[in-house]
Amino acid sequence: SKGQILMPKQKDKEEEPNAFVEQFMGVLPEQENNEKPLFLPTLNNFQVILGNKLGFKYSPFYKFRMAGNISLNGIVNNINNIKPEGIIKLERGDVNIFDVNFYLTRNHTNTVQFVPEQGILNPNLDIKLESLITDISQDYRIPDPYSLGNEIREDLARTGNSQRITVNLNIEGKASQLISKLSNASSVCQKVN
């Protein structure tokens, strides 16, 4: 099906501003003398198709390769009026958190799903990331200069033991839930043995 952009006459109802949207998108400028615009563009099944090699990155913090389709509907004058529907599949990617790279888990279908009722800035996230961290613990002893010990200092002959730890990050839920939880990370982080 082919999408359309309709140009209706005027908007009938004023909506209150959304603080969450304004924080990220800003406020649309007012018309001079509170005049209403001559027309309001409307999206009707407007298809956005993301190809297989589309990349999205903000170095050095994250980068993703994605693909998918989104259908957009609604009046374009306010981001809250746009109703998206569709799924974007994250094919490859990584996120750098505290100098540790977390990579998308390949055996999981990592998705961003847009639901019309939730708006364009609040998709459902189903993302699993993992990282392999190596912990090297070294047991050094302070040498006693008065001992008649070995010719080779004991602290130089010892080798450190390393342990590998797999850290998994699972993100499931609405994007707005993630943003609110980041302010209180200790309540959502769990240790799994």
Image (cartoon, grey):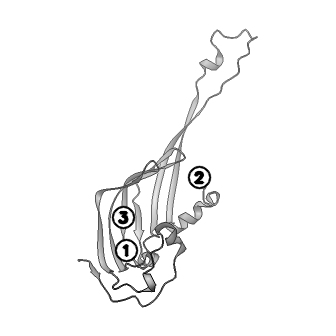
> Is disc 2 surrounded by few (<14), some (14 to 19) or many (20+) residues within 10 Å?
few
Q: Where is residue 31? Give x, y as percent.
A: 43, 81
Inspect the image, locate mark 2, and give the three-letter code of the amino acid beneath it. Answer: Val
Q: Is the Cβ of the residue at disc 2 closer than 8 Å to that at disc 1? A: no
Inspect the image, locate mark 1, and give the three-letter code of the amino acid beneath it. Answer: Glu
Measure how far apart labels 2 and 3 are at the Cα level: 29 Å
Residue wearing tag 3 = 88
Inspect the image, locate mark 3, and give the three-letter code of the amino acid beneath it. Answer: Ile
Could you tell me which secondary element the residue under label 2 belongs to? loop
Q: Nearer the viewer, mark 2 or mark 3?
A: 3
Q: Is residue 115 left or right of residue 169?
A: left
Along the line of sight, the residue nearer the viewer: 58 or 98: 58
Q: Is residue 4 visible?
A: yes
Identify the mark nearer the N-term, 2 or 3: 3
| Residue 28 versus residue 165 in the image, above or below | below
Question: Could you say which quadrant of the image residue 10 lies in?
Answer: bottom left
Image quadrant for the N terminus?
A: bottom left
Q: Which mark is residue 192?
A: 2
Residue wearing tag 1 = 85
Measure how far apart labels 2 and 1 are at the Cα level: 34 Å
